[in-house]
Image: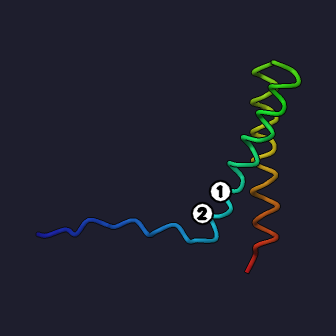
Amino acid sequence: MSSSPLSPSPLPMRWALIFLAATVIALLVGALTFVQTASWPATLLAALGSAGAAIRMLHQVLGK
């Protein structure tokens, strides 16, 4: 009985671009928030919120 391992499908270029842009946006917002507030919880909240918003917005803008 030979079982072939399932190869994962590659990430489509569109989603790779969306995740890369969301990461850059989250890092930028997080850095600016930390510079202004010097609070790690506020930084994480702002970065995660902006990443989620960026993913949603870019998904709609770059839609098929």
Given residues 41 and 2, the one toward you in this image is 41
Instruction: Indicate the colouring scheme.
Output: rainbow
Label for residue 1? Answer: none
Q: Residues within 10 Å of mark 2 (few under 14, many from 20)?
A: few
State which quarter of the image contains the N terminus.
bottom left
Residue placed under numbered mark 2 in the picture = 16
**46 w.r.t. 62: above or below:** above
Residue 3: image quadrant is: bottom left
- Residue at the (83%, 25%) spot, across then down: 35
The x and y percentages for residue 51 are 75, 47
Give, as a three-letter code, the residue at label 2: Ala
The residue furthest left is 1
Q: Residue furthest bottom?
A: 64
Q: Quadrant of residue 20?
A: bottom right
Say which amino acid is labelled 1.
Answer: Phe
Q: Residues within 10 Å of mark 1 (few under 14, many from 20)?
A: some
Label 2's element? helix
32 shown above or below 25: above
Where residue 56 sits in the image (x, y, percent)? 79, 59
Task: Give yes or no for contact between labels 1 and 2 (Cβ–Cβ under 8 Å).
Answer: yes
- Mark 1 lies on a secondary structure that is helix
Residue placed at 82% from the left, 35% from the top?
46
Quarter-of-image position of residue 42: top right
Q: x%, y% of residue 36?
A: 88, 25
Residue drawn at 80 percent across, 18 percent down: 39
Q: Is residue 18 left or right of residue 56?
A: left
Q: Which mark is residue 19?
A: 1
Task: Tell which of 39 and 11 is nearer to you.
Answer: 39
